[in-house]
Amino acid sequence: MKAIQFQSFGKPDVLECVDLPTPAPAAGHALVQVKAASVNPSDVKNVSGHFGHTVVPRVPGRDFSGVVVAGPNEWIGAEVWGTGGDIGFTRNGSHAEFIEIPVAALARKPATLSHAEAASIGVNFVVAWLGTVDYARVAKGETIVVIGASGGVGGAAVQIARARGARVIGVSRYAPLAGSPAARLIDAFVPLDEHTVARVRELTDGAGADVVYDTVGGVVFETALALVRRRGRVVEISATGKRRVDFDLIDFYHNETQLFGADSAKLGVADSAPTMRAIGEGFDAGHFEAPVIAGRFPLERAREAYEAVAGGTPGRVVIEMA
């Protein structure tokens, strides 16, 4: 099979298109013919050596959509999708013509999505689901502030929160991409600047938001804490520009703020499957929309796809197999 592989860490130019043996699935596993796979910022970081547990040589790629071609009879021919914090890191990933995964990882692709669209969902929607549903438990009638609403995870959090009946305030340095679901679904947009806290307070009658989902973290962590109401919940998934932060601990406990960290990389491909099934139900029910696909590349041009993501291309970047 054709695959993208890296044998040492570095910039996208370390990626090579190689021929590898097509996996023969072991007992309890299935073989999926990959039809499309997205490139996430975490894939780029993985190739650069950002994650200490990655073992080389390695086929990268966390998200995929494809068709089961070997495994249990009841799954043969099924269109499936998936994501995981193990594939592409400690086991070969989705940037190949085939991927072997545990049967427990199989989740049916929503019929409403093409393979390219389905491949663009995994990482972003899973970590958004973890933060909004599993941890913060966003409820109907609540107000959530999504910091980084213009990004992939932020856009997914907007959709999930709106589907749960929450009011959404989007906060970002730039407005969400025109035509994206987030651009249509946020109830109010607030630029991320020195006036953010005052503006959000105005929009919440001085109380602050019930939930703040912060996809930026680091340099804006104190802003996130300042946006939440008493006994509100703050979800952090990143530490952009600043790993260690300072904040007023007295204000924090007086406000009785609840703070959550969410990391989808801790979920293997089998662990992620139940969440992918729940997200799939949302797509098939018409509650969610696929994000804008900004770039499509064949497998042999995967290096260009990585370079596009490394350069900050807005929208999703997808590798499509021939």
Image: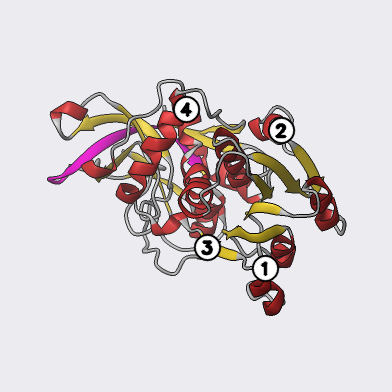
Give the magenta part as a residue range: 26-38
Secondary structure under tag 1 reads loop
Counting residues from the start of the chain, the first of labels 3 and 2 encountered is 2
Seen in the picture, residue 143 relative to 277 is either above or below; the reply is below
Tell me the SS state at disc 4. Answer: helix
Binning the other alpha carbons within 10 Å of mark 1 as few (below 14), some (14 to 19) or many (20 upward) gives: some
Tag 1 residue: 255
Work out which quarter of the rendered image holds the N terminus and state it: top left
Q: Determine crowd level at label 3: few under 14, some 14-19, many 20+ residues with C-alpha closer than 10 A.
A: few
Mark 1 → mark 2, Cα distance in angstroms: 31 Å
Q: Are marks 4 and 2 in contact (CB under 8 Å)?
A: no
The Cα–Cα distance between marks 1 and 3, rounded to whole angstroms, is 18 Å
Tag on residue 265? Answer: none
Tell me the amino acid under the disc marked 1.
Asn
The residue positioned 52% from the left and 35% from the top of the image is 318
Q: Which mark is residue 183?
A: 2
Front-most of residues 304 and 260: 260
**Would you name the residue on which mark 3 appears?**
261
